[in-house]
Structures are given as C-alpha cells and as structure tokens.
Image: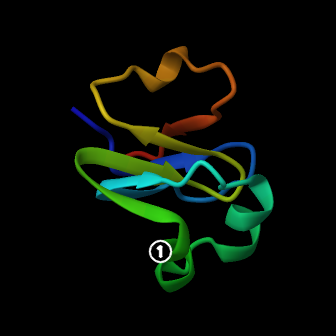
Amino acid sequence: RTCDQLRCTACDFRVSLFNDYIWDQSCDYLFFRNNMPELSKLRAKMIKKKGARAYACQCSWRSIVELTDLQTDQQLRWVCGKH
C-alpha cells in the first residue's frame, strides 16, 4: 500500500506522484526546485514506463519500478501527511 499524502520535512512540500512514469536520468535538484509542482514543466523529464511510479518534491525525487520500502532510504525526508 502506498501513502498518497506524503510530505517532505526538508522542503515542506507535498510529494507528487505520477503513475506509469519514471524520471529521466538528467534530472537534478534545480530542475525540481524551479518546476515543482507545474506538471506541464515536469513532463519535459518524464519517461513513460508501464507499472512504474515517479515521485518528487522540491528537493528529492525517485523512480520506483518495483515494490520498495522508502523508509529504508536515509536521504529521503518523506512522511505521511495524515489522511
């Protein structure tokens, strides 16, 4: 099960998620800092991939293609924003 209300404690931004997409490898901090949460701008670095999910806030991003426990990633500061 995946929380759809994730929030980043580092940038205090809501984590956006995009089904069936991954992030291009050229993505960097400034890309997300300057373009979140504008979907029209983010699409420039999104790659369609069935079954994957792209996550991003203003300071971190991940492409997930298989079931992953994000709590094991010590660099992420994403927490449930409560339902």
Q: Is residue 24 visible?
A: yes
Give the vertical position of 64 relative to 75 (above or below).
below
The answer to whether residue 80 is left or right of residue 48 is right
Q: Quadrant of residue 31?
A: bottom right
Report the amino acid beneath label 1: Arg
Identified at 73% across, 54% down, the residue is 28
Residue annotated with mark 1: 43
- Find the residue positioned furthest to the right: 30
- Locate residue 75, reporting x and y percent: 69, 27
The answer to whether residue 26 is left or right of residue 20 is right
The answer to whether residue 68 is left or right of residue 57 is left
Question: What scheme was used to colour the molecule?
Answer: rainbow
- Locate residue 18, reporting x and y percent: 35, 59
Identified at 66% across, 54% down, the residue is 26
Q: In this rendered view, identify the residue nearer to me: 64 or 76.
A: 64
- Find the residue positioned furthest to the bottom: 40
Identified at 28% across, 44% down, the residue is 52
Q: Is residue 83 visible?
A: no
Q: Quadrant of residue 78?
A: top right
